[in-house]
């Protein structure tokens, strides 16, 4: 039986192998028996266009990073967050926490910055608008003087001379803008106060406070009660002391010998007596003559100095006069002069004999 397979694409040829057996050779039409084609190189010139923006190499940014006082580490008072009780907005203000003495003195400053950075510091005395210089002869001048410079090999140090102060004096400390070059941009870190110009302090300027010596007085309060007038006598004065001093560390240990008087005048026969709170249970004799800190009137501005102890008594010296005698021991005196005022009514009244 023979088959004619018309669907086959194979071409079959019968041959004999060396042993005489028929062999069928199959040639697949997917392979070409033609000679290989010789490849050629296309030499057509092609032009490719790129559109791009080339960025400049970043210019290094260098900064002045800090400013400190070497000889007076706490001299600089810096802004602090403050909650405005009226607006409820957080604001910044400088609180007087540290002061320098009123004496003439030198203060050493140090500016710190990146190598190659440029910094400029100005210190302006707000009392008269003068600027600090590095001159011992003319320590302050009408022309702004800029301190610091280029940081080439570490921090920059300089010394400023502060003149003696007879009144409370405020200095504002701030940095001035610096110009960058084509090779470097120099500015300041955010912790430093920077002004728009050398002549105008920055809104967040640091401050140095130089306070004049302060003094304390003690006395009765002059008062009119009805038709009678209680007139205080001479003030008892503690004496000048440096603002912020802690008196127990000084020679007198802060002990103040107090002796003050008050005199009553006016029409009538009234005499001075102890008020009812100081009389005995029968309302006639003396029960309490001791003076305490609670008997001192609070000042309208500022605050009282720290009072460590009061060893005083209030006494009636005549029908028309009275006295407080004893000692008051002061501690930290604070930053401003104050008067210790004793209202007459804390101790005495005017009554008929």
Image (spheres, rainbow, N blue to C red):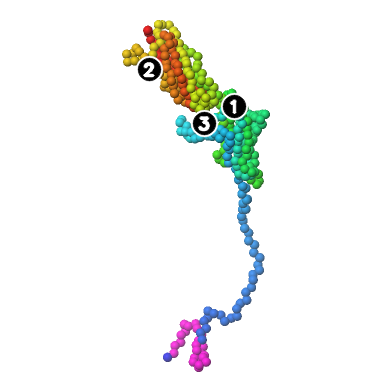
Q: Is residue 3 left or right of residue 190?
A: left
Above or below: residue 59 compared with residue 170: below
* Neighbour tally class for label 3: few under 14, some 14-19, many 20 plus, Cα within 10 Å: some
In which quadrant of the rendered image does the C terminus lie? top left
Please identify the dominant SS of the magenta region. Answer: loop
Dot 1: element: loop
Mark 3 to mark 2: distance in Å?
39 Å
For mark 3, what is the residue?
A: 97
Q: Residue furthest left?
A: 282
For mark 1, what is the residue?
A: 103
* Neighbour tally class for label 2: few under 14, some 14-19, many 20 plus, Cα within 10 Å: some
For marks 1 and 2, the one nearer the N-term is 1
Question: What residue do we see at 40% from left, 9% from top?
Answer: 271
Dot 3: element: loop
- Bounds of the magenta segment: 2-24
The percent position of residue 327, horizontal first and vertical second, equals: 46, 20
The percent position of residue 35, horizontal first and vertical second, equals: 60, 80
* Neighbour tally class for label 1: few under 14, some 14-19, many 20 plus, Cα within 10 Å: some
Q: 14 or 323, which lies in front?
A: 323
As for residue 281 lying within the magenta part, the answer is: no
Above or below: residue 33 compared with residue 229: below
Mark 1 to mark 3: distance in Å?
19 Å
Which one is closest to the eye, mark 3 or mark 2? 2
Which one is closest to the eye, mark 1 or mark 3? 1
For mark 2, what is the residue?
A: 288
The percent position of residue 96, horizontal first and vertical second, equals: 52, 30
The percent position of residue 223, horizontal first and vertical second, equals: 45, 14
Q: Is residue 309 left or right of residue 64?
A: left
Question: What residue do we see at 46% from left, 21% from top?
Answer: 328
């Amino acid at each position: 039986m023979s088959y004619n397979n018309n669907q086959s694409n194979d071409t079959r040829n019968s041959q004999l192998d060396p042993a005489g057996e028929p062999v069928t050779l199959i040639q697949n039409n997917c392979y070409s028996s033609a000679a290989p084609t010789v490849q050629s190189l296309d030499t057509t010139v092609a032009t490719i266009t790129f559109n791009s923006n080339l960025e400049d190499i970043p210019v290094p940014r260098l900064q002045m990073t800090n400013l400190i006082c070497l000889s007076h580490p706490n001299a600089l008072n810096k802004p602090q967050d403050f909650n405005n009780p009226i607006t409820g907005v957080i604001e910044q203000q400088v609180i007087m926490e540290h002061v320098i003495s009123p004496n003439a003195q030198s203060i050493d400053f140090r500016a710190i910055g990146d190598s190659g950075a440029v910094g400029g510091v100005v210190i302006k005395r707000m009392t008269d608008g003068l600027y600090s210089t590095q001159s011992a002869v003319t320590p302050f001048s009408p022309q702004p003087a800029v301190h610091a410079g280029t940081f080439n090999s570490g921090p920059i140090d300089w010394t400023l001379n502060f003149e003696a102060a007879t009144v409370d004096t405020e200095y504002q400390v701030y940095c001035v803008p610096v110009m960058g070059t084509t090779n470097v941009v120099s500015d300041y870190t955010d912790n430093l106060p920077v002004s728009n110009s050398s002549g105008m302090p920055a809104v967040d300027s640091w401050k140095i406070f130089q306070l004049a010596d302060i003094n304390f007085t003690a006395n009765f309060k002059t008062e009119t009660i009805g038709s009678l007038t209680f007139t205080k006598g001479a003030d008892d004065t503690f004496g000048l002391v440096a603002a912020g001093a802690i008196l127990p560390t000084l020679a007198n240990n802060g002990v103040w010998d107090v002796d003050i008087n008050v005199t009553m005048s006016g029409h009538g026969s009234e005499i001075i007596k102890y008020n009812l709170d100081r009389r005995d249970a029968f309302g006639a004799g003396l029960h309490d003559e001791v003076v305490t800190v609670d008997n001192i009137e609070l000042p309208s501005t500022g605050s009282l100095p720290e009072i460590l102890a009061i060893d005083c008594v209030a006494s009636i010296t005549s029908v028309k006069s009275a006295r407080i005698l004893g000692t008051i021991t002061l501690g930290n005196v604070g930053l401003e002069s104050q008067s210790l005022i004793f209202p007459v009514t804390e101790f005495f009244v005017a009554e008929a004999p």
